[in-house]
Amino acid sequence: MKLLILNKRSLLSLAFCLLAGVAALTVTVSSTTKAVQTATSPKENPIYRVESNKKQVAISFDAAWGNEETPQLLDILDEYKVKATFFLVGDWVNQFPEDVKAIAAKGHDIGNHSNTHPHMPQLSDDMASAEITACNEKIEQLTGHAPTLFRPPYGDYNNMVVNTVKSMGMYCVQWDVDSLDWKDPSPEQMTKTVLNKVQDGSIVLMHNGAKNTPAALPSIIKGIQDKGYEIVLIKDLIPEGEYYTDVQGEFHLAEN
């Protein structure tokens, strides 16, 4: 009798183990399938560079923290008769409204760099949209024009961010030439970094608050122009029409 009870318990234990194993296998297969589906989902890329047969390059500045260098940068751009694109954070707009007006009055374009400079992929769709909308409204109130370009803080994005920007009728823009001015290289190093990388349709990244950027800007502008490039606004670098970005983030007009 005892032997029979032991056998039943053994059978029950065996059955339980088998069921647990099947469940674990199901979870593993399900998780693997989900991972494969995620990995194969199309990746949305911002615009890093524009396909172009024109020798044109765009210079951009991100403004998130201070404004000490801004007047000097604007004076240099005036001196060389160059227009640039400034990506402004909403909090920066709040602190320096007169600088915002000056940037616009001098003919430079103003882009959106979010309202509070968060890591956008960590936000929900609605929160990301609210960040962009709030910054747009602040800029439009001061300049009369809402931005058409958005640059995610830290260059941090995912499909949600890119698609949210597109749904708002804006372009999500990065860069393909980083001056690395945020690392405080010498003006000579900064100039060499930029000039070694620019090509047709390039977008150059600089910052209004980097201490050596004003010293490097004249040689960067002159060096770009000596290579035969025209310096234009990012919005003028991007042609109108249906488009796509390839895996490298290069902008291409869609074929009709």
Image: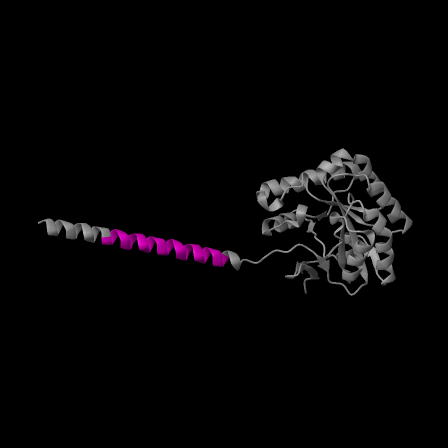
In percent of width and height, residue 125 lies at 58, 44
Residue 106 visible in the picture: no
Task: Tell me which residue sits at (63%, 39%) in the image.
Answer: 130
In percent of width and height, residue 197 lies at 76, 61
Task: Tell me which residue sits at (72%, 54%) in the image.
Answer: 175
Give the residues drawn in magenta, as a range.
14-37
Residue lying furthest right: 79
Q: Magenta segment: does it hold 18? A: yes
| For residue 219, side relative to residue 174 (left or right) | right
Q: Magenta segment: does it hold 113? A: no
Task: Tell me which residue sits at (57%, 58%) in the image.
Answer: 42
In percent of width and height, residue 216 lies at 83, 51
Q: Residue 114: which quarter of the image?
A: top right
Q: Residue 199: which quarter of the image?
A: bottom right
Residue lying furthest left: 1
| For residue 102, side relative to residue 176 (left or right) | right
Give 132 or 177, whichever is nearer the viewer: 177
Give 246 or 208, whichever is nearer the viewer: 208
Q: Quadrant of the C terminus?
A: bottom right
- Dominant SS in magenta: helix
| For residue 10, side relative to residue 186 (left or right) | left
Residue lying furthest front: 186
Residue 163 visible in the picture: yes
Give 83 or 22, whichever is nearer the viewer: 22
In percent of width and height, residue 89 lies at 72, 40
| For residue 178, side relative to residue 8 (left or right) | right
Colour mapping used in the image: one colour
Residue 116 drawn above or below residue 169: above
Number of marks in the rendered image: 0
